């Protein structure tokens, strides 16, 4: 309470007391009003000083972050693995250490590319060239001192197996950010998302960014496909977001191999599922569809990508009438 509010509160209390006893004989003892006001004022001033010091302490405790990213978009830099947090039977969080007082400052939506460190045994392909793969961090872009990847281990995935074999203290070479899609708040009325497996990470990056903005009015629908319920990554985070933002986020899970008790859709993402949940193609530039997943899934839904290029629109989304400018493949 401020000094002024404390004084006013005390004055109101005294006035009420005076009205209550207005018919009683006048007291002979001197008024306590000056002492009451002085006490209230002192308490208010003390409270103000305490709150001011508390705010200053909180501001001082909040880490200062450099306005320069810890990453380099032109060069690979080595970062040390800080810790590994198992997530499920084939996925783990790998947390890498950034220099003190720095963050990744990745724009939304963007990714990084990684390769083996020169300090470690080289990871190369059949032609002897370095294996380089894109990954989208799940840590906030302003997270100080850390960069977190959620990595699913694939039997045919050279890089995913390499990362899963890493231990705290090992290094990974990282370059970025690599811009993917420049997302702007309220750029679209509706956004549809289709993700498969670890292709969920860019969707999470966009949703976490957009939904925490109080001015967001865009309605998001996420269709997330997995083999089993146990394979669903970040489910707890998505369920929390959907509960917190029921009017702007709807999450639909579908699995290939449902277990007993599963109540959601089953099987691959098909035309029927897209037509039921995604925004209509008739919305034109007011709607956007994002797709990310295994190459086979992306090709079936939206046509093959051509390397870093989008490639022609095809598959289910073309059959439903979407235009190329309405669809983006991560």
Image (cartoon, rainbow, N blue to C red):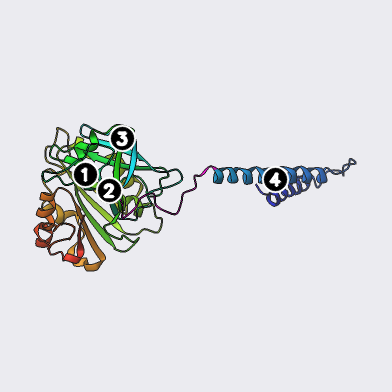
Read off the residue under disc 1. 198
Nearest to the observer: residue 203 or residue 92: 92
Q: Secondary structure at mark 1?
A: helix
Does residue 294 appear left or right of residue 163 in this picture? Answer: left
Do the CB atoms of the residues marked 1 and 4 lie less than 8 Å apart? no
Does residue 11 appear left or right of residue 197 in this picture? Answer: right
**What main secondary structure does the magenta stretch of the protein show?**
loop
Residue 75's place in the image compared with 124, above or below, is below
CA–CA distance in space, label 1 to label 3: 23 Å
Read off the residue under disc 2. 136
Residue 90's place in the image compared with 2, above or below, is above
Do the CB atoms of the residues marked 2 and 4 lie less than 8 Å apart? no
Do the CB atoms of the residues marked 1 and 3 lie less than 8 Å apart? no
Residue 171's place in the image compared with 271, above or below, is above
Read off the residue under disc 4. 44
Read off the residue under disc 3. 170
Q: Nearer the viewer, mark 4 or mark 3?
A: 3
Give the tally of numbered discs.
4
């Amino acid at each position: 309470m401020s000094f002024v509010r404390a004084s006013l509160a005390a004055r109101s209390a005294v006035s009420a007391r005076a009205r209550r006893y207005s018919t009683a004989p006048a007291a002979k003892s001197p008024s306590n009003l000056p002492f009451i006001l002085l006490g209230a004022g002192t308490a208010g001033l003390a409270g103000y000083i305490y709150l001011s010091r508390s705010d200053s302490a909180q501001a001082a405790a909040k880490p200062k972050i450099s306005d320069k990213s810890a990453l380099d978009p032109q060069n690979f830099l080595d970062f040390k693995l800080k810790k590994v947090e198992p997530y499920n039977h084939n996925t783990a969080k790998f947390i890498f250490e950034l220099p003190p007082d720095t963050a990744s400052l990745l724009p939304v939506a963007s990714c990084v590319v990684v390769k083996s460190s020169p300090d470690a045994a080289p990871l190369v392909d059949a032609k002897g060239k370095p294996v380089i793969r894109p990954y989208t961090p799940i840590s906030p872009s302003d997270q100080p001192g850390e960069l977190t990847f959620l990595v699913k281990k694939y039997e045919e995935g050279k890089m995913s197996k390499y990362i899963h074999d890493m231990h705290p203290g090992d290094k990974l070479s990282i370059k970025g950010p690599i811009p993917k899609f420049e997302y702007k708040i309220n750029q679209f009325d509706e956004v549809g998302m289709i993700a498969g497996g670890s292709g969920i990470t860019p969707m999470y990056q966009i949703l976490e960014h957009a939904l925490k903005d109080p001015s967001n009015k865009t309605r998001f629908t996420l269709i997330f496909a997995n083999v089993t319920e146990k394979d669903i990554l970040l489910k707890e985070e998505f369920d929390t977001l959907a509960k917190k933002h029921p009017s702007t986020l709807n999450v639909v899970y579908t699995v290939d191999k449902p277990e007993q008790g599963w109540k959601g859709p089953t099987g691959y993402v098909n035309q029927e599922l897209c037509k039921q949940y995604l925004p209509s193609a008739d919305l034109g530039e007011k709607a956007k569809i994002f797709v990310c997943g295994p190459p086979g899934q992306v090709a079936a839904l939206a046509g093959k990508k051509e390397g870093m290029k989008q490639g022609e629109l095809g598959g289910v989304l073309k059959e439903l009438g979407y235009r190329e400018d309405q669809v983006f493949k991560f």
